[in-house]
Amino acid sequence: MANAAERLFDLVLGNLKDVDDLNWPDDQTRDALDVDPIDEPMDSSDDGIFTFDEEQISENVMERMAGRRVFGELDSDEAEAIEGGVRSRGFEVLAFYKSRRIVSHRPFPGRWGIFYLKQGLDYVGSQIIQSYPGYGDPKNLAVNFLRAHERFHYRADLQTLMFEATVGKHLYLPLRNALRGRRSHFVEEALANRQVWDWAKRGAIGLEEFAIDFMSLQPNAYSRFLEPRLDLAAEWAGTVVDLKPPGTSFRQDLAHWVEATPTGLLRASLCPEYVIYPRKLSTWISPALVLPPVHVVQDGDDVVKLLQGRLAHLQAKWKQTKTKMLENRLLHGLNFKPWPKDGPERYSVRVDDNFRAHLQHLGGGKWLAYMLGPHKKLGHG
């Protein structure tokens, strides 16, 4: 039997007019790595990728997973794939939300809701253990960490449904189609990450620093979660209601309505949740970023001059940062990630809370640091 949210989706969607394809400019915001498997056309040849051993879960995920290994160590290939995926595609390599609107689509025809990848739970749990040894139950913390993000997508889906009921036309599906290849630029990801931040900084949780480090690694709009909430909401409403490309329409008049979903529709029981088991993680995440190795880090002439002059106070911190990169470039505290704004093979790394460095990969694990400066001056908000 359909629940209240499902009945509302069916009622509204049955009365909407179609919208013509959105002819957005094919500009620099398109990214070959920015792929959502739900959006991609699939046929029977995809069964080997998208067939999972699945089990529905309830409010407490782990209670419904009796007899299964629900938390464990990732092998090195899985860890590398996830690390690259987080930096190139954000949360959706760990868990994803599938709308009721596309319930008949793959993956999992006939099911909708939140889907947690088993390896995603393992990954987040292991990262929490590394950051806070002995703190809390990493399994439940991992689930709730991912849930906070994905439940915002459910909430945004409902809010879009209400706008659709008002204007009488489809908004969600035309927008989703237009966002193929640039999903990470959609400000909804910033708002979803802000929900994670809000959850993590609650006194009883105490994972605020972990959440900031984790989400700052993520690309484009994902990393904008610290911007003013109403500004993000105005941008979201402009994209959803006006069907304009991300960052080109802002509806301050609708900003307060973005998170005004009736509480009765936000009951946890209304949005189904599943833990899923990919047969091979790399096929789910592919294509994904692979961070090059770090064997040597050399300072360019400009960086040497800065460290000998007005940024001399950063000498010890920069040396420590380079040592950490050589030991483990994947440490979240480094916030080591691509920086395509400066060109191909360009990356950025955190020196401390106020300064960053930009580096160019010269090949074979050899790196050149070509810029050092404050976060904002280097374009990091």
Image: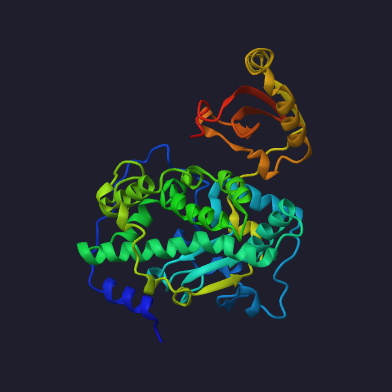
At 40% from the left and 64% from the top, the residue drawn is: 155
Q: Report the side of 377 relative to 8 (left or right).
A: right
Residue 191: horizontal and vertical position, in percent? 44, 52
At 28% from the left and 51% from the top, the residue drawn is: 243
The answer to whether residue 41 shows anywhere in this view is no
Q: Report the side of 337 relative to 315 (left or right).
A: left
The colour scheme of the drawn protein is: rainbow
The answer to whether residue 297 shows anywhere in this view is yes
In the rendered image, the vertical position of residue 301 relative to residue 264, given as above or below? above
Q: Which residue lies furthest to the front in this view?
A: 203
Q: Report the side of 284 relative to 104 (left or right).
A: right
Q: Quadrant of residue 19?
A: bottom left
Q: Which of 33 and 320 is in front in this view?
A: 320
At 69% from the left and 13% from the top, the residue drawn is: 308
At 53% from the left and 47% from the top, the residue drawn is: 33
Residue 61: horizontal and vertical position, in percent? 61, 74
In the rendered image, the vertical position of residue 320 relative to residue 192, given as above or below? above
Q: Which of 194 and 298 is in front in this view?
A: 194
Residue 1: horizontal and vertical position, in percent? 41, 87
Residue 349: horizontal and vertical position, in percent? 63, 34
Q: Nearer the viewer, residue 119 or 226?
A: 226
Q: Report the side of 183 relative to 78 (left or right).
A: left
Q: How many labels does the image show?
A: 0
